[in-house]
Amino acid sequence: MTIEAHNLVWGVGRKTIVRDVSVSVQKGETLGLIGPNGSGKSSLLRLLAGLRQPRSGDVRINGQDVARVSRRALARQVAFVQQNAATDTNVSVHDVVKLGRTPHRSALAGWSAADEAAVSNALAQVDMQSRSGQAWQTLSGGERQRVHIARALAQSPIVMFLDEPTNHLDIHHQIEILRMVRDLPLTSIVALHDLNLAAMFCDRIVVMQDGALVACGSPGDVLTEALLHSVFRVAASVSAADASERPHIRFRSE
């Protein structure tokens, strides 16, 4: 088991946003988090990554309670890719990815061969080695997202968390990014809006509603017409799209 979360509760003031959520993630799995706006999926993602402290409950990564791990040590195990992260600084692709090595370097340490190898390997994994010297501002949206994932990979994490990594990308780049994430040799937890993309690329799906976990399982088990109606308030037909038996959702106007 890579991640185990037990009875997580978190909120702001008197408002509870995550309500008694327990979930586990297997090593090498791609887990999707879906739910309507305000369902708590992004908050749950940050709790699992150790970026927020729960009011109650705990998260363990490889058996370690993340609340008892230093932020620097945690950053050597966990990488977080935000949606649409941006910078106005005139930097190269290589410079952006180099930032991922920060948790592994002391304040006075020079840039090492191991650091350079980690950056080069990360760029290779996202097929951006040829753009290493290119200016960040000249990249397309899909290319920028690849670079952000490369920066996360340069951390050498065992788990990667991604919050809506395909937002504002065209469908080609959405599929390209999620296929790449699915094929990476590590555990990934991805918050997504697009239900068909979640069905295509996730091994299992967690469904959130009003801060609570209401379903967890394979896409075929979770994405039913009844669940789509009760959680997302939409009418839809669900069918197996191909030989993979992953469900395909067709939304209806009525």
Image (cartoon, grey):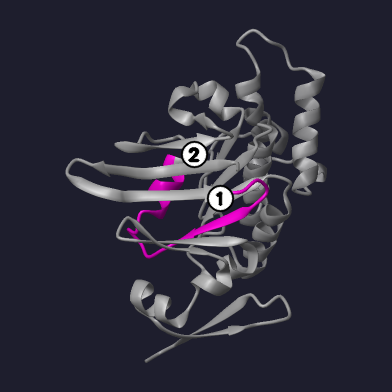
Indicate the amino acid at tag 2.
Ala
Residue 163: image x %, image y %? 50, 50
The residue located at (67%, 68%) in the rendering is 172
Q: Nearer the viewer, residue 121 or 78?
A: 78
- Residue at the disc numbered 1: 189
Find the magenta span and give its range: 26-47
Indicate the amino acid at tag 1.
Ile
Compared to residue 235, the image places residue 42 above or below, namely above
Compared to residue 102, the image places residue 84 above or below, namely below
Crowd around label 2: few <14 · some 14–19 · many ≥20 (10 Å) = many
Residue 79: image x %, image y %? 58, 37
Q: Is residue 140 magenta?
A: no
User: Which disc number belongs to residue 66?
Assistant: none
Helix, strand or loop at disc 1? strand
Q: Is residue 36 magenta?
A: yes
Compared to residue 19, the image places residue 219 above or below, namely below
Is mark 2 in CB contact (under 8 Å) with mark 1?
Answer: yes
The residue located at (78%, 26%) in the rendering is 116
- Residue at the disc numbered 2: 49
The residue located at (73%, 80%) in the rendering is 243
The outermost residue toward the top is 108
Q: Nearer the viewer, residue 143 or 107?
A: 107
Residue 249: image x %, image y %? 53, 81
How far apart in space, not on screen, are marks 2 and 1 (Cα)? Answer: 9 Å
Quarter of the image with the C terminus in it: bottom left
Location of residue 240 by image quarter: bottom right
The residue located at (32%, 49%) in the rendering is 18
Q: Nearer the viewer, residue 157 or 221?
A: 221
